[in-house]
Image: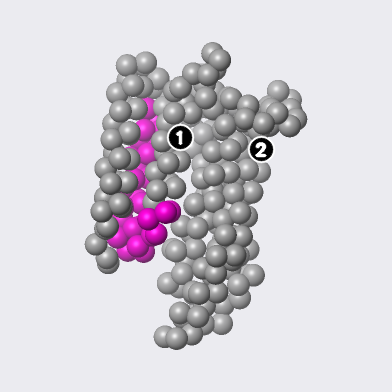
Amino acid sequence: MSKPTKPQLLIFIGTIAYIIAFAIYYIAKQNYEFMLYIAVMIVLLIIMTILHKKFNFPTGVLLGVSIWGLLHMAGGSLQVKGNRLYSLVLISITETSGTPLIRFDQFIHFYLYIFLTIIAFYLLKPHLKEEFNTLTISIILIFAGMGIGALNEIIEFGAVLTFPETGVGDYFNTAWDIVFNTLGAIVGVLYLNLSGKLSNAKQQIQRL
């Protein structure tokens, strides 16, 4: 277990700071839906801290996840043209049953699952054997990202059941979320392959 670096400590402190700031903001605005997400963020922060102590994630991964948390909190509170930031259309490509592409919400799903898939690799890495197949591990990691995405949608479904007006969206929104989660997972795996992370892991195992 390595000691956290100064940049990693700053990321941790910054994450706590914006969680507290948004919690105060949501309480003031009586946005109880996103108070649920604050609770989820706190749980995720605790889990990430515990996992980092054991698996020593790269600073870039920690920063990427922290930035996602900030964007997620902003997406549910900041108003753009009278609507929540999550509803903002970044690139107008098409619209399916009232769900336009590509919205800020869909981009955030894509962005997050790049990093979650990379994290899944670091969790899996200590268990890899010398003869592991890179393609097989890549497919497993994509499915891992998709599985985490399914859990995310269950949490959003819980919000829909708990609060009358959540802004989470309909069936098409859920389906597009799954699509963008999967695309993010694929990009995460492409990064692991193109950056040599998977091949380097194989070489490290072979040297042991």
Q: Quadrant of the C terminus?
A: bottom left
Whether residue 150 is visible to the viewer of this picture, yes or no, is no
Task: Kindly identify the residue that appears in the image at 44 percent across and 28 percent down.
Answer: 74
Mark 2 falls on what kind of element? Answer: helix
Circle 2 sits on which residue? 175
- When the figure is inspected, residue 159 is found, relative to residue 190, above or below; the finding is above
Q: Is residue 16 left or right of residue 90?
A: left
Q: Quadrant of the N terminus?
A: bottom left
Q: Residue furthest bottom?
A: 207
Circle 1 sits on which residue? 71
Report the predominant secondary structure element of the magenta stretch: helix
Marks 1 and 2: in contact by CB < 8 Å? Answer: no
Residue type, mark 1 in image: Leu
Magenta-drawn segment = 35-61
Magenta stretch containing residue 47, yes or no? yes
Name which of mark 2 and mark 1 comes first in the sequence: 1
Q: Residue furthest top?
A: 82
Q: Distance from label 2 to label 1 (Cα)? A: 21 Å
Whether residue 139 is visible to the viewer of this picture, yes or no, is yes
Q: How packed is label 1: few (under 14 Cα within 10 Å), some, or many (20 or more)?
A: some
- When the figure is inspected, residue 150 is found, relative to residue 117, above or below; the finding is above
Mark 1 falls on what kind of element? Answer: helix
Give the image location of residue 187, x and y in percent.
61, 54
Q: Is residue 10 left or right of residue 185?
A: left
